[in-house]
Amino acid sequence: MNIVVCVKHVPDTASRIRIGANGTSIDTSDISFVLNPYDEIAVEESLKLKEAQGGNVTVLTLGGENASSSLRTALAMGADEAIHIKAENWQGDSYATAKNIANEIQKLPFDLILFGKQAVDDDNLAVPQMVAEFLGIPSVTVVVSLEINGNTGKAEREIEGGKEVVEFSLPVAIAAQKGLNEPRYPSMKGIMTAKRKTITTIEATQFEAKAKIVKMEIPASRSTGKILGGVSELIGSLKNEAKVI
């Protein structure tokens, strides 16, 4: 089985985010970047399938020079190959990102494409479905259970108030949700082996974006909570201060 895993290099969720001088991007001068946590789940799932059924795992990312470190992490976990679509100071939206990824994947042999359900930096939840559409294949998102048997498969996905079971034929794009598996830590042997693996680099194509960021703002600070003395005081506050009744 030929598996492609699409990953993203994102700010560590513990980082303190500041808006850049241009007002439309974040200041990355003092931020640590990591492999997107949902994409770690996708990488782990590809490795489990490879171990059970054989095959090859290729990880792919679009991003600047530093994005290669997330590819190295995936290689250290056990991926076989890596492709870096180089895009310094990338200004493209989800459409342009998905178009670049789909154009590169269509050059490869693939049976299964895995993504994390979303990137934790922009939370757009759009690229997996767009890539599938560009490639003309089905997609299943927020997947918490996955079975592949020959040329068919079954996925369980989260929906509001329950779960949904979807059956499909390969090739397919799957977007992984928490609960699908528990990602492994790279071993020392894996880390050393990853350093010797070659990352294929190509330049991104600047497709016209369909959307653009016009302004970024830090959310306003929340007001201090207020302890009320009883129901009558609560009603008075809702009526006179909040003016909702």
Image (cartoon, helix red, strand yellow):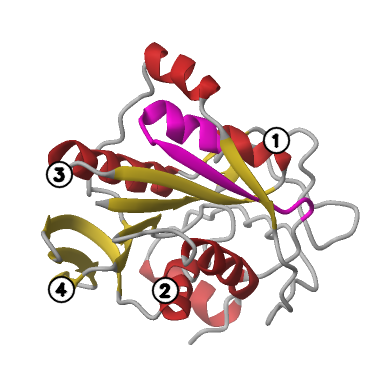
Q: Where is residue 25 in the image (x, y as percent from the top left)?
A: 78, 57
As measured in the structure, the alpha-carbon distance from the residue carrying label 3 to the one carrying label 2 is 26 Å
Position of 18 with respect to 15 (left or right) is right
Magenta stretch: includes residue 83: yes
Q: Point out the frontmost of discs 1 and 2.
A: 2
Residue neighbourhood size for the residue with mark 3, other residues' Cα within 10 Å, grouped as few (<14), some (14–19), many (≥20): few
- Would residue 14 be visible to someone looking at this image? no
As measured in the structure, the alpha-carbon distance from the residue carrying label 1 to the one carrying label 2 is 29 Å
**Residue assigned mark 3:** 53
Residue plotted at (45% across, 39% down): 81
Q: Point out the frontmost of discs 4 and 3.
A: 3
Mark 2 or mark 3, which is nearer the start of the sequence? 3
Mark 1 or mark 4, which is nearer the start of the sequence? 1
Residue 129 is tagged as 2
Residue plotted at (85% across, 61% down): 23
**Residue assigned mark 4:** 166
The magenta segment is: 70-89
Position of 174 with respect to 94 (left or right) is left
